[in-house]
């Protein structure tokens, strides 16, 4: 369990670091765009898709608490719920299904092994 928790935390930190430090790349992958030369989209990706997940992963590694690793799971599962909502309400796409699958697997795994 410890190795799996560490891997989940590192995945969270890794993907979070990409969103935090390479928001334009992340926005390209997610097929999102900025509007009217605003940097608010970049800010949102850095915060919500980036540093938030870095913070969750680092916090879990520093504390080593099952609840901290479960929190990573709840965050990823929340992302999966949002992604499925988009699939249902906005229409499916290959990328949405791939992202949903990754979010769901990481999230549910972290919850199951820590609760």
Image (cartoon, rainbow, N blue to C red):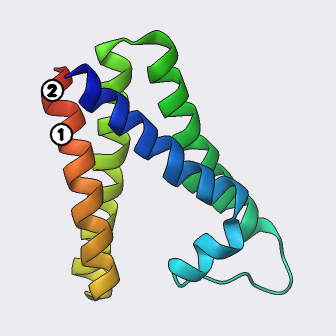
Q: In the image, what residue occupies the spot 13% across and 31% down? A: 112
Q: Quadrant of residue 108?
A: top left
Vertical position of residue 69 compared to residue 28: above or below? above
Residue 114 position, x and y percent, is 20, 22
Judged left or right of residue 103, residue 23 is right
Q: Quadrant of residue 22?
A: bottom right
Q: Residues within 10 Å of mark 1 (few under 14, many from 20)?
A: some
Q: Is residue 25 left or right of residue 6?
A: right
For this orientation, the residue located farthest to the front is 3
- Residue drawn at x 82%, y 70% is 39
Task: Give the quadrant of residue 33.
Answer: bottom right
Q: Estimate the x, y position of residue 75 in percent, counting from the top left.
A: 37, 42
At which x and y percent is residue 110? 24, 34
Q: Residue under circle 1? A: 109
**Residue 46, which numbered label?**
none
Q: Which residue is mark 2?
A: 113
> 15 or 48: which is nearer to us?
15
SS for callout 2: helix
In the rendered image, residue 30, in percent from the top left (x then y), is placed at: 50, 77
Residue that sits furthest to the right in the current view = 37
SS at mark 1 in the image:
helix
- The residue at 27%/66% (across/down) is 100
Q: How many marks?
A: 2
Badge 2, how many Cα within 10 Å: few under 14, some, many 20+? some
> Vertically, is 56 above or below 92?
above
- Dot 2 and dot 1 residues touching (CB under 8 Å): yes
Which residue is located at x 27 percent, y 73 percent?
98
Q: Quadrant of the C terminus?
A: top left
Quarter of the image with the N terminus in it: top left
Q: CA distance from mark 2 to mark 1?
A: 6 Å
């Amino acid at each position: 369990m410890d190795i799996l928790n560490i891997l989940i935390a590192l995945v969270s930190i890794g993907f979070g670091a990409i969103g935090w430090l390479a928001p334009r790349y992340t926005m390209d992958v997610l097929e999102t765009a900025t509007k009217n030369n605003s940097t608010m989209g970049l800010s949102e990706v850095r915060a919500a898709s980036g540093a938030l997940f870095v913070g969750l992963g680092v916090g879990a590694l520093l504390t080593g608490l099952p609840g901290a690793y479960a929190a990573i799971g709840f965050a990823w599962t929340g992302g999966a719920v949002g992604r499925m909502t988009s699939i249902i309400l906005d229409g499916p796409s290959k990328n949405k299904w791939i992202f949903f699958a990754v979010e769901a697997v990481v999230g549910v795994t972290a919850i199951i092994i820590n609760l």
